[in-house]
Image: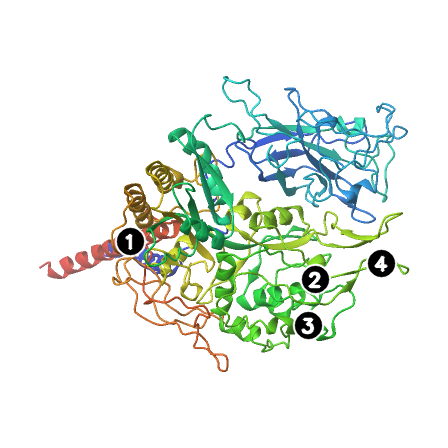
Amino acid sequence: MTAVLTRRRPRILIAVGCLLAALVVALLPVPPGTAQAVAAEGTESSAVTKSGKKGKYDDFSDLEVTVHQTEGLRSQGVRVTWEGGAPTRPGPGQFSANYLQIMQCWGDDPGGPDPEQCVYGGSAAVVADGQGRVLNPSLDPDEAARSFVPFRPANGEPATTQAFDYTYFGPLDTNEQQANLTFANGTGETVFEMQDGIQADYLGCGVNTAPEGKPAAPRPCWLVVVPRGLHETNGNDVGFGSLGTSPLSATNWAQRIVFPLEFLQVDQFCPEGQPERPTIGTELMTDAATSWQPKLCTSTDSTFGFTSAGEELVRNQVLSTSGETPTLGFTVDPVAQPEGGPAVVHAPTAVSGLAFAFFIEGPDGVVQDMKLTPRLVAKILTHSYRNDVSLSPTPEYLKDNPIDFTEDPEFKKLNPQFPDTPVSPMSLMVPIGNSDTARLMWSWLQSDREAREFLAGQPDPDGMKINPHFEELELDRNTTINEYPKVDPSRGDALQNSQTNPLTYTILDLAPYALDLHDGALRARRGNNNRTIQYQAGNGTPDKLVNDPYPPGQRAVMAIVDVPSAERYGLPTAALRNADGGFVKPSNTTLLAGVDAMRPSSGNPAVLKPDPARAKGQAYPLTAVTYAAASVNQDTAARKAYAEFIRFAAGPGQTQGLSAGELPPGYAPLPGRLRTQAENAADDLERGAVPDGPTGGPDPDDPGAAGPGPAGGAGGDSSGAGTGGAASGAGGAAGGSAEPSASGPAAANASGAPSAGPQQNVAEAKGGFTPGEIMGVIRWVLVGVLILGGAAGLSGPVMLRLAHRRTP
């Protein structure tokens, strides 16, 4: 008997363990979406690692540098990491010694480029220290007797004739990196801005070099890394001074590590003689449209151009379409078709959104994580921090507000891990002009009680108040606003101002507009918002204000960008608080959950309207769906061509990847129902007739047609770090969203920019499974297996005991 009981105990313990494990697994939360929008597969497949070598004075043989993408390149950011380096030595100004200098070069020699083919010396921050294209032969015994290295462009134009010649690149557009920090453990990391032949024709990367009639041969380029040690080119140890010689100088150049780069073709990819079909649209389509163009012109008989433009202009052009002016437009909000006018089809083509991208250098490297609430964003957009209006003097009406958002108690409480930055962050970069995306941003702020109250003039718990010049705009309830106003009239004294001829700057000098969302991302990648507040004497010409870029190690910028541009340039993005208090970053999962939260637009039920007040659970609040809009008032050939564009966009164009014709990183694939809607719209367009009612779109009268999504109704108040509120539900309960009154508090979580129509689930369940859904299925399968195992383990001893009792 004793032996039997002894054998049972392990079985019982295992069975109980299985049941306990099942309970633990059941209670574990399903992991949310990835930190950023999922990059396309293959990004790392062309990574290349190379080692340094021993030099005349410094040994770099333990240094290993990895460029994480060397093929399929375009104008984008590329991650570069290294290990085995010597820790950077601090010095006067920024770094003294032991750092990496990185530059992009052209050159058709398979052995690599020469210094005359490299983009370096365009930054005023290093030219002043003699580290640009300036040479000092007296310090470098291996250098020929010349005073500078000219730059020789790839496009055949003349070489530069002096060291400080900014004919081809200068402080505002150079992509050189003069000093990359190596940490105490010998590692380092940066994101390098690659430039293709469209952005930098003097490099010509990706330009077709093949003779006419021959297969295309896009020009390759090079990434050159020059490690710098403790010694000057003459062998002298710099001590705690700074290295003062150029990486282009012979002794330094001999230590270079060279990586070949293969770029996507940027020109001549369409057959000649094909009809050209213009398209125009929202910036949210730019990366997708330009990726699809090469495949479209070879898979159809048309060449499709694309022009980025404001959505209101796009809608007007679609409405004015005729046989002589064919157009396919891309917009977020629907085209309001006039009664009796030609029908307009709307086809969903892309899922993306807005993001807050940043490049902030702390004492231990580049900051990667940040949380923002709607109220913090409201403070930033209204220039309510002291340094967002003037560095000197501080306006009286802002004197009690924090100097910048990183010093705001609300931000510090939310981001306790955020490091103290060496400098105050520059003002948030926003795009100029009117747009549907700006309307979406204000709708998000107006959907949040805390942000709405701040915009209405109520101080936050720490006493911070809105800049009074913005309070007059009624941003808490103005549902028509579709731009980012800069209305503060104050002026500041220019940095290093002259006493005899003082100059002052305005808010537009301190915080200039970005040209568009992509331009904001590009400026953020460079760590410079292009502000002009530095005094410069004219020396015979009028004194002026010029740009004052921060040096490496002290850059701190943030911009409103589109998610594809943030991915393209490798920028981290902030996690934003959504309607039930969760903080989410843009990813495939969160963008698709954002689509699930949308509902039909009152202007056209075939178009889903972003509704941040309904973005709960994993839903990203600044998600947007871009629609192709086309009038049937076009000739047969144009309608057929644009229908082919839509079918490609909804079909092969939704395959994520980096190659031409694929969906670039930063876009989530269209859910299956939206693809079907796009195909139906293409059929209607080609046929030239649209049936009554929406074609293939969400049915506003069918609460269950859209599949799973956030429940309707007002929901919980988004102003808290909430854990309540249903994240999702099958079918949506009807509810309302009331516009807050000017005199009293709004209902909890009521949107300041309400969408007309019933609140219900409208987005189709996603085609395929998201990573979170897959993990959820696996979790419950595992739970079932553990329960069955536990039950089996316990049933054995029970049956034996029952059998023993019945034995006579």
Q: Which residue is mark 1?
A: 11
Look at 37% across and 63% down and name the residue there: 727
What amino acid is labelled 4 in the image? Asn
What is the distance, in whole Å, between disc 1 and disc 2 at their CAs?
74 Å
Which tag, 4 or 1, sits closer to the chain's start?
1
- Element marked by disc 4: loop
Look at 37% across and 38% down and name the residue there: 638
- Element marked by disc 1: helix
Which tag, 4 or 3, sits closer to the chain's start?
3
Nearer the camera: disc 4 or disc 1: 4
Nearer the camera: disc 3 or disc 1: 3
Q: Which residue is mark 3?
A: 401
Which tag, 1 or 2, sits closer to the chain's start?
1
- Kindly indicate whether the residue at mark 2 contacts the one at mark 1 (C-beta within 8 angstroms): no
What amino acid is labelled 3 in the image? Asn
Q: Which residue is mark 4?
A: 497
